[in-house]
Amino acid sequence: MAESYRRSQWSNGLFILPYLSVFIVLLVFPLFWGAWLSLHKVDLFGPGRFVGLGNYARVLADPVFLQALRNSIVFVLVSVPSLVVLGLFLALALNKTTRTTSFLRGLFFSSSVLSVTIVTLIWRFVFIPGDGLLAVISEQFGVQPVNFLSTSGWSLFSVGVATVWWCIGLPMMLFLAALQQIPNDLYEAAALDNASPWRVLKRVTLPSIARTIMLVTIIQIVMQFQLFGQAQLMTNGGPNGTSRPLVMYIYEVGFVRWDVGKAAAASEFLFLIILVAAMAQYVVSSRKSEASE
Amino acid sequence: MSASIEITNVTKHYGALSVLDDISLSIKAGEFVVFLGPSGCGKSTLLRMIAGLEDVTAGTISVADRRVDTLPPGKRGVAMVFQSYALYPHMTVAQNMSFGLENIGLPKPEIERRVSQAAATLEIAHLLDRKPAKLSGGQRQRVAIGRAIVKEPKAFLFDEPLSNLDAALRGRTRLELAQLHARLGSTMIFVTHDQVEAMTLADRIVIMHNRKIEQIGTPMEIYRRPASRFVAGFVGSPAMNFVPLTSVTSNGGTINIGTSGLGDIHAAFHLPSGFSPDGASLGIRAEDVTVLPAGQTGIALKAEVVERLGDRTLIYGHLSDGTKLTAETDGRSEARGGDTLQIALDTTAIHLFDAAGTAHHSEGD
Ligand SMILES: Nc1ncnc2c1ncn2[C@@H]1O[C@H](COP(=O)(O)OP(=O)(O)O)[C@@H](O)[C@H]1O
Ligand SMILES: [Mg+2]
């Protein structure tokens, strides 16, 4: 019986084989290839020359890289908490089944299905100087309009606003799914226990969805470190690189200046950051959930 | 600490669905009242309206002579034990019990005193630092009761609190609830569909059926003098036997009851003048049907299934006209399926039900 059980387990593995092979070809292989590239001087012409950690040294010495790294970190530090808090807020507000809430859920989620091109088009209409929505409004109030897309500080902020608007659907839906798992009788017990709405949120709701909050945070950190399209299309990294994120740096070094080895080295840094972020959150969340059992 | 509860003309609708219709009930301070009825008859709904978890569509509810049906749940002075226990999963047992007390701003020493006292009473003191996930079903149950006790409520509301326990634990907890009621002397309302729980715990049972209260009475009243055919059939195990009537003739204090399966029966009854045998039936419990010793002649019962319970034997069979009837006899009976037995009825224990289901009881007992 044990034998047949083991055999059936192996045959179950066959079902994931197609996926596994695609995964290896498209993910694991490039991972190692990228690592190999980062140790070589590679350009468009001819094979690479082994340079050891030379590319890494060049990347770390590049002020443009350091600026892009800083931009990405700032962007993640602002956009991820915004997405988590706003997503949670929307989920709490829409956690009832009425016609209005279903409509609003659909509405807030609908931005997620748009392509980055359309998202940036929409937000360019808002932020663009002269005829942009914000410019028109500030003129109405007699305020000197800010040139959002080409003022240092405001440009990254504008990209962040467009990003939060674009990405809010997934956190909201994940939070809604988690909220719906909370048994209603807990809220009834809390009502009989005279708990204020704030106490209910703090002592019943938030602890019950702690895992989901962690999960959403990890997902968003990983996603927002990969910011590229919005920045490229809205500000092109400007002014003076103040809204250039890491991925855009990698793109420019690798595909505009064709310094592939250096770009690969920068990618490895990005990979490391995302890995560390994910691991840190994972450790925190597993320790938290142990304490709650 | 205990309080009377007054329910006056309470009606409940969910949209177009009417669940409870014009319910009135008064519960005395310190009384243990059980709502008994089949699933879906609105017991939980009535309990939840007292707790404040459902709105009343019409009518009023008062606790300790104060109208509460417009107050939020926490302000009604009642505590509820849920069927699922509804313990806060992320709080320890102690936190679960003190949460409600913290919310009303009770001083810490008082909270600690109440929690440790309740924990001692319920023998859960060693569990105070555990989370609910690390407790057994019975332990969770105790914590849920503890969470109610520490509030020192005017009334306790229980919604099928024993239904998630195994049989042995259910019996023990039932006993402990009775002891708890005796010690605290609080008003308690207990919802169940289990008649054994109702019979053993209740001072009074409220039988609910079809959006209405069918009968309110002590367990013995309910059992011996059921107000309707529904109550008679719902309470008691095995269920009461019903035999259709063919005729009724009254002569003074006694009547002649004609049936096709049991023949003619003579019993002491005061029936209203308009009582018609159409659609009426005679009811008698299995324990009031005697199996006659061999050689005596009575009413023939063809046994189909014989159930031996050790102390007694249940004989499921049918009468000459095919009407089903169950008889109870002692544990040493040697009757077997297929036998034809001779039986007799205790005519003082007969009930008659008119076509509408209203009961009339024999004057004999
Ligand atoms: N929230 C609700 N919406 C609509 N119908 C409900 C709701 N709650 C209960 N009901 C209906 O009310 C009736 C009584 O339910 P309930 O009080 O839970 O019965 P019981 O506790 O006696 O089993 C049932 O028919 C049930 O379907
Ligand atoms: Mg119920």
Image: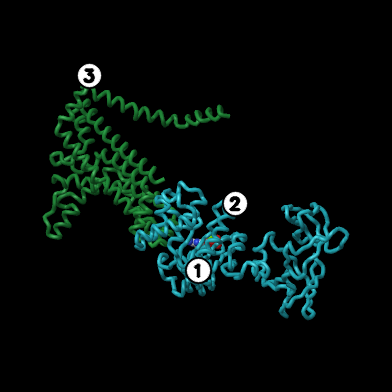
Could you classify mark 2 by the number of other residues whose Cα lies within 10 Å: few (under 14), some (14-19), or many (20 or more)? Answer: few
Describe the element under mark 1 as helix, strand or loop. Answer: strand
Q: Residue at x 24, y 31 (%)?
A: A269
Tag 1 residue: B12
**What's the distance in space between the residues labelled 1 and 3, CA to CA?**
82 Å
Output the chain of dot 2. B
Output the chain of dot 1. B
Of all chains in the rendering, the one displayed in green is A
Which label was assigned to residue A234? none
Is B339 above or below relative to A225?
below
Describe the element under mark 2 as helix, strand or loop. Answer: helix
Along the line of sight, which residue is nearer the eye, B283 or B31? B31
**Amino acid beneath label 2:** Ala
In the rendered image, is residue B324 in sight? no
Left or right of B2: which side holds B100? left
Of all chains in the rendering, the one displayed in cyan is B
Is A199 above or below relative to A225?
below
Whole-percent x, y for residue B349 in the image:
74, 69
Along the line of sight, which residue is nearer the eye, A198 or B106? B106
Disc 1 beta carbon < 8 A from ligand 1?
A: yes
Tag 2 residue: B168
**Amino acid beneath label 1:** Lys
Tag 3 residue: A50
In the rendered image, is residue A185 in sight? yes
**Comparing labels 2 and 1, the label whose residue is closer to the camera:** 2
